[in-house]
Image (tube, rainbow, N blue to C red):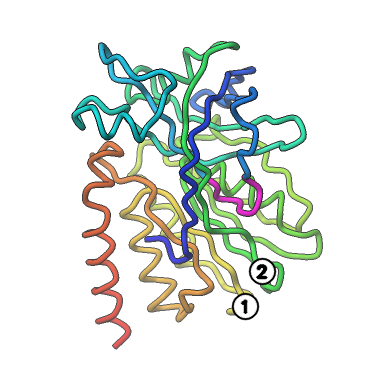
């Protein structure tokens, strides 16, 4: 449900793991570098993302690695599996790309890879894409998300200028998952602890109950699709915010892996837009 034009970079890059760190019990930071990142080109947006490529077991890929050749010559079920991750930071001078991974044991694909990653490991990825950065002319900023949106929220807070205000709501599993979010701006950061509850319920309640300083807001709402849908309706229909003041998207959906969510995301978005249009009519 992105409301800003996404700029999708299709460049293929080969990165080398430089170092890793566990910043919370379930969040792993991986820093990637190497000559293959020359010309990576992130920095315009604070929600930049890359598509990590994970080879299928038992499949031999062409050398040099080339996605166009792979797509042309191999059946689809042998293509590398892609997982989309937000860029937490990009240092063009040091040529270092930082990505944060949520890790829940061996569940999933990218999280376990991050847990096993060691300096010298290599990974291919495509990107960057992106479409949001905090507007300098906004009266204040609203940032809302779950763990999947934390990297973009963190990057955005670092970009918001000192004389601006921000209200931030982040929902995580529990207090142990809170992390430092440095920012030069006047930010009120509220951590909401799920403690086994449904993902996003606390975020919806918090935004619905908050008093907006005024309507001169630039809002960023990203994370699990169901709570994003609820907050999109609230902000658009009940608060009356125009689309140009919103960056809002379901990064993922409960019960679906990325492949399953992406295959149905267009229909989901169309349904959301149709329901919203009827409510606004």
Q: CA distance from mark 2 to mark 1?
A: 7 Å
Q: Nearer the viewer, residue 193 or 35?
A: 35
The boundaries of the magenta stretch are 42-48
Q: Most extreme residue toward the bottom, as rendered?
A: 281
Check the image and report above or below for 79 versus 152.
Answer: above
Residue at figure coordinates x 43%, y 31% from the top left:
52
Quarter of the view holding residue 66? top left
Look at mark 1 in the image and give the residue it sits on: 216
Check the image and report above or below for 147 versus 140.
Answer: above
Residue at figure coordinates x 71%, y 49% from the top left:
158
Q: Which mark, by number, is residue 167?
A: none
Residue at figure coordinates x 29%, y 71% from the top left:
273
Q: Nearer the viewer, residue 188 or 155?
A: 155
Q: Secondary structure at mark 1?
A: loop
Q: Is residue 231 magenta?
A: no
Of the 4 image quadrants, the one containing the N terminus is bottom left
Circle 1 packing at 10 Å, graded few (<14), some (14-19), many (20+), is: some
**Answer yes or no: do the residues labelled 2 and 1 have beta carbons within 8 Å?**
yes
Q: Give how far across and how far down residue 60 sits, in percent.
A: 30, 14
Q: Nearer the viewer, residue 119 or 55?
A: 55
Q: Give how far across and how far down residue 51 sits, in percent.
A: 43, 37
Assign the magenta stretch its main secondary structure.
Answer: loop
Q: Secondary structure at mark 2?
A: strand
């Amino acid at each position: 449900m992105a409301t800003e034009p996404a700029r999708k970079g299709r460049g293929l890059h080969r990165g080398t793991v430089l170092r890793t760190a566990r910043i919370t019990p379930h969040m792993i930071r991986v820093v990637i570098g190497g000559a293959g990142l020359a010309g990576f080109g992130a920095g315009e947006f604070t929600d930049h993302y890359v598509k990590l490529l994970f080879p299928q077991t038992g499949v031999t890929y062409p050398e040099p690695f080339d996605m166009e050749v792979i797509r042309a010559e191999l059946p689809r079920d042998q293509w590398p599996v892609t997982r989309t991750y937000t860029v937490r930071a990009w240092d063009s001078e040091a040529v270092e790309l930082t990505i944060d991974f949520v890790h829940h044991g061996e569940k999933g694909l990218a999280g376990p890879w991050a847990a096993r990653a060691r300096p010298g490991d290599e990974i291919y990825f495509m990107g960057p894409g992106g479409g949001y950065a905090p507007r300098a002319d906004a009266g204040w900023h609203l940032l809302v998300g779950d763990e999947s949106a934390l990297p973009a929220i963190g990057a955005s807070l670092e970009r918001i200028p000192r004389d601006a205000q921000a209200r931030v709501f982040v929902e995580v599993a529990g207090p142990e998952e809170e992390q430092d979010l440095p920012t030069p701006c006047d930010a009120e950061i509220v951590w909401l602890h799920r403690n086994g509850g449904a993902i996003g319920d606390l975020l919806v309640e918090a935004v619905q109950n908050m008093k907006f300083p005024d309507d001169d807001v630039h809002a960023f709402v990203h994370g699990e699709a169901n709570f994003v849908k609820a907050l999109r309706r609230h902000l658009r229909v009940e608060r009356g915010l125009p689309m140009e003041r919103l960056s809002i998207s379901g990064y993922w959906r409960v019960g679906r892996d990325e492949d399953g969510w992406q295959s149905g995301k267009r229909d989901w978005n169309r349904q959301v837009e149709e329901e919203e249009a009827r409510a606004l009519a």
